[in-house]
Image (cartoon, rainbow, N blue to C red):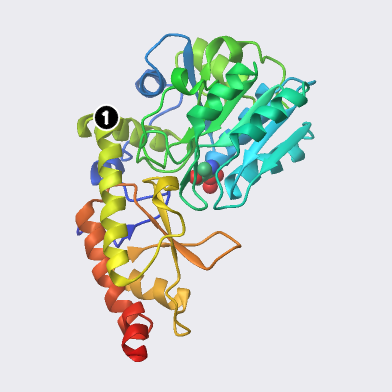
Protein backbone atom coordinates (compact mmCIF):
# COMPACT_ATOMS: atom_id res chain seq x y z
CA UNK A 1 0.00 0.00 0.00
CA UNK A 2 1.30 3.49 -0.90
CA UNK A 3 2.60 5.38 2.14
CA UNK A 4 0.79 8.55 1.03
CA UNK A 5 -2.73 7.16 1.38
CA UNK A 6 -4.48 6.77 4.73
CA UNK A 7 -6.02 3.41 3.86
CA UNK A 8 -6.96 1.10 1.03
CA UNK A 9 -10.57 1.38 -0.12
CA UNK A 10 -11.90 -2.12 -0.73
CA UNK A 11 -15.19 -0.67 -1.89
CA UNK A 12 -16.98 -0.69 -5.24
CA UNK A 13 -16.24 2.96 -6.02
CA UNK A 14 -15.00 5.45 -5.11
CA UNK A 15 -12.07 3.08 -4.93
CA UNK A 16 -8.33 3.18 -4.47
CA UNK A 17 -6.78 5.12 -7.35
CA UNK A 18 -3.13 5.49 -8.30
CA UNK A 19 -1.04 8.49 -7.22
CA UNK A 20 -0.68 9.45 -10.89
CA UNK A 21 -4.47 9.58 -11.36
CA UNK A 22 -4.77 11.83 -8.31
CA UNK A 23 -1.86 13.99 -9.58
CA UNK A 24 -3.65 14.55 -12.90
CA UNK A 25 -6.10 16.80 -11.00
CA UNK A 26 -3.49 19.45 -10.16
CA UNK A 27 -4.27 21.75 -13.11
CA UNK A 28 -7.28 24.06 -13.31
CA UNK A 29 -8.73 24.13 -16.83
CA UNK A 30 -11.32 26.37 -18.39
CA UNK A 31 -14.31 24.53 -19.85
CA UNK A 32 -14.04 26.84 -22.88
CA UNK A 33 -10.44 25.99 -23.61
CA UNK A 34 -9.24 23.69 -26.40
CA UNK A 35 -6.70 22.05 -23.99
CA UNK A 36 -9.61 20.78 -21.96
CA UNK A 37 -12.15 20.02 -24.67
CA UNK A 38 -9.56 18.04 -26.60
CA UNK A 39 -9.33 15.72 -23.58
CA UNK A 40 -13.08 15.20 -23.67
CA UNK A 41 -12.88 14.29 -27.37
CA UNK A 42 -10.07 11.84 -26.59
CA UNK A 43 -12.02 10.24 -23.72
CA UNK A 44 -15.16 9.78 -25.83
CA UNK A 45 -13.19 8.12 -28.57
CA UNK A 46 -11.34 5.80 -26.18
CA UNK A 47 -14.57 4.77 -24.47
CA UNK A 48 -16.12 3.77 -27.79
CA UNK A 49 -13.00 1.75 -28.66
CA UNK A 50 -13.16 -0.04 -25.31
CA UNK A 51 -16.77 -1.03 -25.89
CA UNK A 52 -16.79 -1.95 -29.54
CA UNK A 53 -14.70 -2.77 -32.56
CA UNK A 54 -17.19 -1.77 -35.24
CA UNK A 55 -18.45 1.68 -36.29
CA UNK A 56 -21.84 3.03 -35.32
CA UNK A 57 -21.27 3.67 -31.61
CA UNK A 58 -20.76 6.94 -29.78
CA UNK A 59 -20.20 8.14 -26.21
CA UNK A 60 -21.81 10.81 -24.03
CA UNK A 61 -20.47 11.98 -20.67
CA UNK A 62 -22.91 13.22 -18.03
CA UNK A 63 -22.24 15.19 -14.85
CA UNK A 64 -23.09 13.51 -11.54
CA UNK A 65 -22.68 10.06 -10.05
CA UNK A 66 -23.57 6.87 -11.93
CA UNK A 67 -27.25 7.06 -10.99
CA UNK A 68 -27.53 10.41 -12.81
CA UNK A 69 -26.35 8.70 -16.00
CA UNK A 70 -28.88 5.89 -15.48
CA UNK A 71 -31.64 8.43 -14.93
CA UNK A 72 -30.51 10.45 -17.97
CA UNK A 73 -30.69 7.31 -20.12
CA UNK A 74 -34.06 6.02 -18.88
CA UNK A 75 -35.56 9.50 -19.06
CA UNK A 76 -34.16 10.31 -22.51
CA UNK A 77 -34.23 7.25 -24.77
CA UNK A 78 -37.70 5.82 -24.14
CA UNK A 79 -40.26 7.48 -26.44
CA UNK A 80 -43.42 9.06 -24.98
CA UNK A 81 -45.42 5.95 -25.91
CA UNK A 82 -42.68 3.52 -24.84
CA UNK A 83 -42.62 0.95 -22.04
CA UNK A 84 -39.67 -0.43 -20.11
CA UNK A 85 -39.12 -3.96 -18.86
CA UNK A 86 -36.72 -3.98 -15.90
CA UNK A 87 -35.05 -7.26 -14.96
CA UNK A 88 -33.87 -7.01 -11.39
CA UNK A 89 -32.16 -9.05 -8.69
CA UNK A 90 -30.78 -6.42 -6.38
CA UNK A 91 -30.76 -2.83 -5.22
CA UNK A 92 -29.36 -1.35 -8.43
CA UNK A 93 -31.92 -3.13 -10.61
CA UNK A 94 -34.62 -1.90 -8.24
CA UNK A 95 -33.21 1.61 -8.55
CA UNK A 96 -33.83 1.51 -12.32
CA UNK A 97 -37.49 0.63 -11.61
CA UNK A 98 -37.66 3.45 -9.06
CA UNK A 99 -36.34 5.94 -11.64
CA UNK A 100 -38.86 4.66 -14.20
CA UNK A 101 -41.76 5.07 -11.76
CA UNK A 102 -40.54 8.51 -10.74
CA UNK A 103 -40.51 9.58 -14.41
CA UNK A 104 -43.99 8.04 -14.86
CA UNK A 105 -42.79 5.81 -17.70
CA UNK A 106 -44.87 2.62 -18.14
CA UNK A 107 -43.01 -0.19 -16.41
CA UNK A 108 -43.05 -3.98 -16.27
CA UNK A 109 -40.79 -5.67 -13.72
CA UNK A 110 -39.31 -9.14 -13.55
CA UNK A 111 -37.84 -9.32 -10.07
CA UNK A 112 -35.80 -12.14 -8.61
CA UNK A 113 -34.31 -12.65 -5.19
CA UNK A 114 -30.86 -11.24 -4.52
CA UNK A 115 -29.20 -14.62 -4.85
CA UNK A 116 -31.14 -15.80 -7.90
CA UNK A 117 -30.16 -15.28 -11.55
CA UNK A 118 -32.86 -14.07 -13.97
CA UNK A 119 -35.03 -16.71 -15.67
CA UNK A 120 -34.35 -16.54 -19.41
CA UNK A 121 -37.55 -18.36 -20.41
CA UNK A 122 -39.63 -15.99 -18.35
CA UNK A 123 -37.96 -13.03 -20.07
CA UNK A 124 -38.68 -14.54 -23.49
CA UNK A 125 -42.33 -15.12 -22.59
CA UNK A 126 -42.79 -11.66 -21.12
CA UNK A 127 -41.40 -10.03 -24.27
CA UNK A 128 -43.63 -12.20 -26.43
CA UNK A 129 -46.80 -11.48 -24.40
CA UNK A 130 -46.43 -7.73 -23.94
CA UNK A 131 -46.08 -5.98 -27.30
CA UNK A 132 -46.10 -2.57 -25.59
CA UNK A 133 -42.58 -3.11 -24.22
CA UNK A 134 -40.07 -1.12 -26.28
CA UNK A 135 -36.97 -1.28 -24.06
CA UNK A 136 -35.37 -3.70 -21.61
CA UNK A 137 -33.00 -2.64 -18.81
CA UNK A 138 -30.80 -4.75 -16.55
CA UNK A 139 -27.71 -4.50 -14.36
CA UNK A 140 -24.66 -6.46 -15.56
CA UNK A 141 -22.77 -6.91 -12.29
CA UNK A 142 -25.30 -6.49 -9.44
CA UNK A 143 -23.04 -4.74 -6.95
CA UNK A 144 -25.55 -5.48 -4.18
CA UNK A 145 -24.25 -9.02 -3.96
CA UNK A 146 -21.47 -9.25 -6.58
CA UNK A 147 -23.59 -11.40 -8.89
CA UNK A 148 -22.74 -11.37 -12.59
CA UNK A 149 -25.94 -11.45 -14.63
CA UNK A 150 -26.09 -13.24 -18.01
CA UNK A 151 -26.10 -9.96 -19.96
CA UNK A 152 -24.99 -11.50 -23.24
CA UNK A 153 -27.65 -14.25 -23.28
CA UNK A 154 -30.35 -11.75 -22.32
CA UNK A 155 -29.07 -9.33 -24.99
CA UNK A 156 -29.66 -11.99 -27.57
CA UNK A 157 -33.23 -12.56 -26.36
CA UNK A 158 -33.93 -8.81 -26.37
CA UNK A 159 -32.51 -8.41 -29.90
CA UNK A 160 -34.54 -11.36 -31.19
CA UNK A 161 -37.67 -9.75 -29.76
CA UNK A 162 -36.76 -6.51 -31.55
CA UNK A 163 -36.47 -4.38 -28.38
CA UNK A 164 -33.77 -1.89 -27.34
CA UNK A 165 -31.40 -2.98 -24.60
CA UNK A 166 -30.10 -0.73 -21.82
CA UNK A 167 -27.32 -2.23 -19.73
CA UNK A 168 -26.19 -0.80 -16.40
CA UNK A 169 -22.56 -1.93 -16.66
CA UNK A 170 -21.58 0.55 -13.99
CA UNK A 171 -19.44 -1.79 -11.93
CA UNK A 172 -18.24 -4.07 -14.75
CA UNK A 173 -17.22 -1.88 -17.70
CA UNK A 174 -13.43 -1.81 -18.01
CA UNK A 175 -13.04 -4.73 -15.63
CA UNK A 176 -14.93 -7.46 -17.48
CA UNK A 177 -14.57 -7.93 -21.25
CA UNK A 178 -17.77 -7.14 -23.14
CA UNK A 179 -18.78 -5.64 -26.43
CA UNK A 180 -21.79 -3.68 -27.62
CA UNK A 181 -22.14 -5.96 -30.66
CA UNK A 182 -21.93 -9.39 -29.06
CA UNK A 183 -24.05 -8.34 -26.07
CA UNK A 184 -26.54 -6.57 -28.42
CA UNK A 185 -26.44 -3.49 -26.19
CA UNK A 186 -27.92 -0.23 -27.43
CA UNK A 187 -27.09 1.89 -24.37
CA UNK A 188 -24.34 0.93 -21.95
CA UNK A 189 -23.99 2.98 -18.77
CA UNK A 190 -20.95 3.26 -16.51
CA UNK A 191 -19.12 5.87 -14.44
CA UNK A 192 -15.69 7.36 -13.84
CA UNK A 193 -15.03 5.83 -10.45
CA UNK A 194 -15.44 2.10 -11.01
CA UNK A 195 -13.31 -0.30 -13.09
CA UNK A 196 -11.62 2.43 -15.16
CA UNK A 197 -10.27 3.54 -11.76
CA UNK A 198 -10.89 7.27 -11.99
CA UNK A 199 -12.42 9.52 -9.33
CA UNK A 200 -16.16 10.23 -8.93
CA UNK A 201 -17.86 13.10 -10.75
CA UNK A 202 -19.42 11.89 -13.98
CA UNK A 203 -21.05 8.94 -15.66
CA UNK A 204 -21.06 8.01 -19.32
CA UNK A 205 -23.23 6.25 -21.85
CA UNK A 206 -21.98 4.38 -24.88
CA UNK A 207 -24.77 4.27 -27.42
CA UNK A 208 -25.84 2.93 -30.74
CA UNK A 209 -25.54 6.25 -32.57
CA UNK A 210 -28.41 5.75 -35.01
CA UNK A 211 -30.78 4.92 -32.17
CA UNK A 212 -29.57 7.80 -29.98
CA UNK A 213 -30.07 10.22 -32.88
CA UNK A 214 -33.74 9.23 -33.01
CA UNK A 215 -34.35 10.25 -29.38
CA UNK A 216 -34.33 14.04 -29.84
CA UNK A 217 -37.04 15.63 -27.74
CA UNK A 218 -37.84 12.54 -25.63
CA UNK A 219 -36.07 13.78 -22.48
CA UNK A 220 -38.16 14.29 -19.36
CA UNK A 221 -35.49 16.52 -17.82
CA UNK A 222 -33.47 19.50 -19.02
CA UNK A 223 -30.13 18.88 -17.32
CA UNK A 224 -30.31 15.10 -17.82
CA UNK A 225 -31.15 15.28 -21.54
CA UNK A 226 -28.87 12.65 -23.02
CA UNK A 227 -29.49 13.55 -26.67
CA UNK A 228 -28.87 17.23 -26.09
CA UNK A 229 -25.67 16.56 -24.13
CA UNK A 230 -24.47 14.25 -26.92
CA UNK A 231 -25.38 16.77 -29.60
CA UNK A 232 -23.31 19.48 -27.88
CA UNK A 233 -20.28 17.22 -27.33
CA UNK A 234 -20.46 15.80 -30.83
CA UNK A 235 -20.86 19.07 -32.68
CA UNK A 236 -18.98 21.52 -30.46
CA UNK A 237 -15.64 19.76 -30.15
CA UNK A 238 -16.11 18.09 -26.78
CA UNK A 239 -18.06 20.84 -24.99
CA UNK A 240 -20.45 19.82 -22.20
CA UNK A 241 -23.69 21.63 -21.52
CA UNK A 242 -23.23 23.43 -18.19
CA UNK A 243 -20.15 23.26 -15.95
CA UNK A 244 -18.29 20.00 -16.22
CA UNK A 245 -16.06 18.33 -13.61
CA UNK A 246 -12.78 19.43 -15.21
CA UNK A 247 -10.44 17.84 -12.64
CA UNK A 248 -12.34 14.57 -12.74
CA UNK A 249 -12.08 14.53 -16.53
CA UNK A 250 -8.28 14.96 -16.35
CA UNK A 251 -8.02 12.15 -13.80
CA UNK A 252 -10.18 9.95 -16.01
CA UNK A 253 -8.00 10.45 -19.09
CA UNK A 254 -4.96 9.45 -17.02
CA UNK A 255 -6.89 6.41 -15.71
CA UNK A 256 -7.67 5.37 -19.30
CA UNK A 257 -3.95 5.60 -20.16
CA UNK A 258 -3.16 3.40 -17.17
CA UNK A 259 -5.78 0.87 -18.24
CA UNK A 260 -4.03 0.64 -21.63
CA UNK A 261 -0.61 0.38 -19.93
CA UNK A 262 -1.87 -2.51 -17.81
CA UNK A 263 -2.78 -4.38 -21.00
CA UNK A 264 -6.37 -3.28 -21.47
CA UNK A 265 -9.56 -4.82 -20.14
CA UNK A 266 -8.28 -8.41 -20.55
CA UNK A 267 -5.37 -7.85 -18.19
CA UNK A 268 -7.38 -5.80 -15.73
CA UNK A 269 -10.00 -8.56 -15.66
CA UNK A 270 -7.23 -11.10 -14.99
CA UNK A 271 -5.96 -9.04 -12.04
CA UNK A 272 -9.45 -8.66 -10.58
CA UNK A 273 -10.02 -12.42 -10.94
CA UNK A 274 -6.73 -13.00 -9.18
CA UNK A 275 -7.70 -10.56 -6.39
CA UNK A 276 -11.04 -12.25 -5.97
CA UNK A 277 -9.79 -15.84 -5.90
CA UNK A 278 -6.92 -14.93 -3.55
CA UNK A 279 -9.40 -13.27 -1.21
CA UNK A 280 -11.94 -16.10 -1.29
CA UNK A 281 -9.46 -18.90 -0.66
CA UNK A 282 -7.81 -17.03 2.23
CA UNK A 283 -11.23 -16.26 3.76
CA UNK A 284 -12.34 -19.86 3.36
CA UNK A 285 -9.20 -20.95 5.22
CA UNK A 286 -10.44 -18.78 8.09
CA UNK A 287 -13.84 -20.49 7.91
CA UNK A 288 -15.64 -17.53 6.29
CA UNK A 289 -18.02 -18.24 3.43
CA UNK A 290 -19.25 -16.38 0.37
CA UNK A 291 -22.93 -15.58 -0.12
CA UNK A 292 -22.90 -16.66 -3.78
CA UNK A 293 -21.76 -19.89 -5.37
CA UNK A 294 -18.72 -19.50 -7.58
CA UNK A 295 -20.70 -19.83 -10.80
CA UNK A 296 -22.70 -16.66 -10.09
CA UNK A 297 -19.84 -14.63 -8.64
CA UNK A 298 -18.26 -11.66 -10.46
CA UNK A 299 -14.63 -10.64 -9.89
CA UNK A 300 -15.81 -7.14 -8.84
CA UNK A 301 -17.04 -7.44 -5.27
CA UNK A 302 -17.58 -10.39 -2.93
CA UNK A 303 -20.24 -10.81 -0.23
CA UNK A 304 -19.34 -12.85 2.86
CA UNK A 305 -21.61 -14.14 5.60
CA UNK A 306 -20.88 -12.78 9.07
CA UNK A 307 -18.91 -15.28 11.18
CA UNK A 308 -21.28 -17.48 13.11
CA UNK A 309 -20.55 -15.98 16.51
CA UNK A 310 -22.71 -13.92 18.90
CA UNK A 311 -19.61 -11.85 19.69
CA UNK A 312 -19.32 -10.51 16.14
CA UNK A 313 -20.23 -6.88 15.61
CA UNK A 314 -19.88 -5.45 12.09
CA UNK A 315 -19.22 -1.92 13.34
CA UNK A 316 -16.38 -3.08 15.60
CA UNK A 317 -14.99 -5.28 12.81
CA UNK A 318 -15.12 -2.36 10.38
CA UNK A 319 -13.48 0.07 12.82
CA UNK A 320 -10.67 -2.34 13.71
CA UNK A 321 -9.92 -3.04 10.04
CA UNK A 322 -9.93 0.67 9.30
CA UNK A 323 -7.33 1.23 12.05
CA UNK A 324 -5.28 -1.35 10.18
CA UNK A 325 -5.78 0.69 6.96
CA UNK A 326 -8.42 -1.40 5.19
CA UNK A 327 -11.86 0.02 4.51
CA UNK A 328 -14.47 -2.62 3.67
CA UNK A 329 -18.16 -2.30 2.77
CA UNK A 330 -21.31 -3.23 4.65
CA UNK A 331 -23.75 -5.75 3.17
CA UNK A 332 -26.83 -4.54 1.34
CA UNK A 333 -29.19 -7.50 1.27
CA UNK A 334 -32.20 -8.32 3.37
CA UNK A 335 -31.97 -12.11 3.34
CA UNK A 336 -28.76 -12.60 5.33
CA UNK A 337 -26.16 -10.80 7.42
CA UNK A 338 -23.26 -10.11 5.12
CA UNK A 339 -20.40 -7.71 4.51
CA UNK A 340 -18.71 -6.99 1.19
CA UNK A 341 -15.14 -6.68 0.06
CA UNK A 342 -14.34 -4.91 -3.22
CA UNK A 343 -11.81 -6.51 -5.53
CA UNK A 344 -11.41 -3.52 -7.87
CA UNK A 345 -9.18 -0.43 -7.92
CA UNK A 346 -5.43 -0.14 -7.60
CA UNK A 347 -5.30 -3.24 -5.39
CA UNK A 348 -3.46 -6.50 -5.87
CA UNK A 349 -3.50 -10.11 -4.64
CA UNK A 350 -0.87 -9.28 -1.98
CA UNK A 351 -3.27 -6.65 -0.58
CA UNK A 352 -5.98 -9.30 -0.36
CA UNK A 353 -3.64 -11.64 1.49
CA UNK A 354 -2.60 -8.92 3.95
CA UNK A 355 -6.21 -7.97 4.46
CA UNK A 356 -7.16 -11.51 5.44
CA UNK A 357 -4.24 -11.66 7.91
CA UNK A 358 -5.68 -8.51 9.52
CA UNK A 359 -9.21 -9.97 9.43
CA UNK A 360 -7.97 -13.07 11.22
CA UNK A 361 -6.32 -10.99 13.96
CA UNK A 362 -9.36 -8.74 14.36
CA UNK A 363 -11.73 -11.71 14.67
CA UNK A 364 -9.39 -13.25 17.24
CA UNK A 365 -9.40 -10.10 19.37
CA UNK A 366 -13.20 -10.00 19.11
CA UNK A 367 -13.34 -13.66 20.15
CA UNK A 368 -15.49 -14.30 17.12
CA UNK A 369 -13.21 -16.08 14.71
CA UNK A 370 -14.85 -19.18 13.24
CA UNK A 371 -11.80 -21.09 14.60
CA UNK A 372 -12.78 -20.07 18.16
CA UNK A 373 -16.13 -21.76 17.77
CA UNK A 374 -14.49 -25.00 16.70
CA UNK A 375 -12.07 -24.82 19.67
CA UNK A 376 -14.82 -24.25 22.20
CA UNK A 377 -16.88 -27.10 20.72
CA UNK A 378 -14.09 -29.62 20.95
C1 LIG B 1 -22.17 2.16 -8.45
C2 LIG B 1 -23.34 1.66 -9.18
C3 LIG B 1 -24.34 2.53 -9.67
C4 LIG B 1 -24.32 4.01 -9.47
O1 LIG B 1 -24.21 4.41 -8.17
P1 LIG B 1 -23.83 5.90 -7.80
O2 LIG B 1 -23.76 5.85 -6.31
O3 LIG B 1 -24.87 6.78 -8.31
O4 LIG B 1 -22.51 6.17 -8.46
C5 LIG B 1 -25.36 2.00 -10.43
N1 LIG B 1 -25.41 0.70 -10.70
C6 LIG B 1 -24.48 -0.17 -10.26
C7 LIG B 1 -24.60 -1.61 -10.62
C8 LIG B 1 -23.42 0.28 -9.48
O5 LIG B 1 -22.49 -0.58 -9.04
Quadrant including the N terminus: bottom left
Relative horizontal placement of residue 305, taking residue 213 as reference (left or right):
left
Task: Say above or below: 38 vs 257.
Answer: above
Mark 1 lies within 8 Å of ligand 1 (Cβ measured): no
- Residue in front for this viewpoint, 345 or 121: 121
Write down the quadrant of residue 194 in the picture.
top left
Note whether residue 89 is visible. yes
Residue highlighted by disc 1: 264
For the image, the number of numbered tags is: 1
Residue at 68% x, 40% y: name it. Answer: 110
Residue at 64% x, 15% y: name it. Answer: 162
Note whether residue 204 is visible. no
Residue at 37% x, 89% y: name it. Answer: 377
Circle 1 packing at 10 Å, graded few (<14), some (14-19), many (20+), is some
- Residue in front for this viewpoint, 78 or 67: 78
Q: Where does the image place residue 214, in percent across and percent down from the top left?
A: 65, 11
Relative horizontal placement of residue 149, taking residue 132 as reference (left or right):
left
Q: Secondary structure at mark 1?
A: helix
- Residue in front for this viewpoint, 274 or 251: 274
Q: Where does the image place residue 64, in percent across and percent down from the top left?
A: 54, 39
Q: Where does the image place residue 14, in percent across and percent down from the top left?
A: 42, 49
Quadrant including the C terminus: bottom left
Amino acid sequence: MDADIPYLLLTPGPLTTTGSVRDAMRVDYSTWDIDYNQRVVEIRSQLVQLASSSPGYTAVLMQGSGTFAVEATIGSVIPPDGKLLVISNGAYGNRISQITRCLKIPLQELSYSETEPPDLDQIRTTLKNDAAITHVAMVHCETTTGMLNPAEEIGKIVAEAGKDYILDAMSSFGGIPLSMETFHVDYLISSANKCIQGVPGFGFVIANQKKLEQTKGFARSLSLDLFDQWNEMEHKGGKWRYTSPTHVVCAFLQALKELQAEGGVTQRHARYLDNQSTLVSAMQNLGLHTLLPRALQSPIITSFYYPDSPLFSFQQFYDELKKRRYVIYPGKISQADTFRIGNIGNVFPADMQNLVVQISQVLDTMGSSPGEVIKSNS
